[in-house]
Amino acid sequence: MFLSKEEEAMLKGDHGAGSQKAMELLVAIGEAFDAPKMIPVTRAHAASSGQEGDLFFVEMLAKGGARCKIPTTTNPVVNFEYFQNIIDISEEHAEASVAWKVKQHYKEIGAIMSQSCIPYLAENIPQYGEHVAFSESSATPYVNSVIGAFTNRESIQTALAAGVIGETPEFGLHLKENRKGTVLVKVKTHLRNGYDYSILGQYVGKKVGNGIPVFDGIGKRPSIDQYINLCAMLNVPGAIPMFYIPGFTVDAETLDDAFAGNHPQDVIEVTDRDMKQTIEELQTTSGDVDLVMLGCPHYNLDQLGVVAKLLDGKRLRPNVSVWINTSETTKTMADRAGYVKVLENAGANLVTDTCIDMFCFNNMKGKTGMTDSPKCAYYRRFGNVRVGSVEECIAAAVE
Ligand code: F3S
């Protein structure tokens, strides 16, 4: 791979040990994928987590003096202040945790502590045609397909390295010729709401595995939350960096535009029966629930408004809890809209800056949980799980 003099210098360690490690990773990835050179990126999103692998890399870079060169946002980890009052986590215990250390090192490295898994709506919004490095299941396809920026399906580490160097190897979806549809998906079911888009994503992600689906038969422009759900769930059982819905997503008015000369490798149909079967595969019970978990991916303002409307004037059933995950930015807006008061009056927990996969939720282990998110159903590992639309989730939780 061609490297400029400055890039060579970074690789040799002339700009510090942290930048050297970041460059080593990017060059190794570039060489593995036959990238001819590095190209500039203007923003990044690192899907930071409370996991050892994340700590290892961000700590190494931060201690080596690396600092983010371009705006680099972070995923939710744990809001320790919030959970200190709930699970009685001592400051000492918090500070010893991997999640705490991860957050400190991201601050040190100069990342933007957005702590949101939908940063492309508020804190870090790429423009059409911009080359970026975004990790996180919903972020990559949203950025490529809905916004029309260019990103590969990054890992936490490659996105952070790109944030530090301000460059990424030129391969994959940074090149127009690799952004052609590969599989035709004929949608023969009526998609009514965001939950249906989640189930569609789960089904198609599993069927396609790795590729660029082109959806035919979605007659209406999806709403933002429908797009987010489709993007996220395509990447739970699958590895889908982008997709097309001709007429609605970017750069394709027709099926021919989306395939751009490619012959579909496969044709998939999605029927009512497939949707029903997908739901049945996800859930392990239809019985009473102990808790409802919403906000995976983080709920946006509109979604919080929907839950507030559903819970307005209602009380939760005894021994049932409702947890809703969002970002601090969204909560501030929801507060101004009056939603937070309604949710809290009903007894719901509005949790900011936290991922459903974090240890602070461990007291839910073994319980029967209900969620509108196949991703949550998969990662949260409830004792038993039900899935349903947000309306069905709230109906199961209230008196
Ligand atoms: Fe977001 Fe964590 Fe779910 S990052 S998408 S809340 S698994």
Image (tube, rainbow, N blue to C red):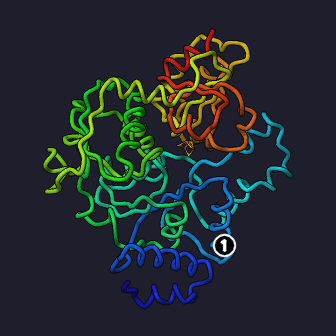
| Residue 262 vertical placement versus 324 (above, below) | below
Which is more toward the observer, 136 or 110?
Answer: 136
Q: Mark 1 sits on what residue? A: 60
Residue 180 in view of the camera? yes
Give the residue drawn at x 16%, y 45%. 255
Q: Quadrant of ligand 1?
A: top right
Q: Where is the N terminus found, in terms of image quarters?
A: bottom left
Q: Where is the C terminus found, in terms of image quarters?
A: top right
Residue 76, how many percent across, how many down?
60, 48
The answer to which image quadrant residue 88 occupies is top right
Q: Secondary structure at mark 1?
A: helix
Residue 394, how many percent across, how many down?
55, 18
Q: Is mark 1 within 8 Å of ligand 1?
A: no
Residue 310, how many percent across, how many down?
52, 16
Give the residue drawn at x 39%, y 61%. 152
The answer to which image quadrant residue 36 occupies is bottom left
The amino acid marked with disc number 1 is Met
Residue 50, how many percent across, how many down?
67, 53
Q: Is residue 239 left or right of residue 74?
A: left
Residue 332 in view of the camera? no
Give the residue drawn at x 51%, y 28%. 372
Q: Is residue 94 left or right of residue 115?
A: right
Give the number of marks.
Answer: 1
The answer to which image quadrant residue 386 occupies is top right
| Residue 271 vertical placement versus 182 (above, below) | above
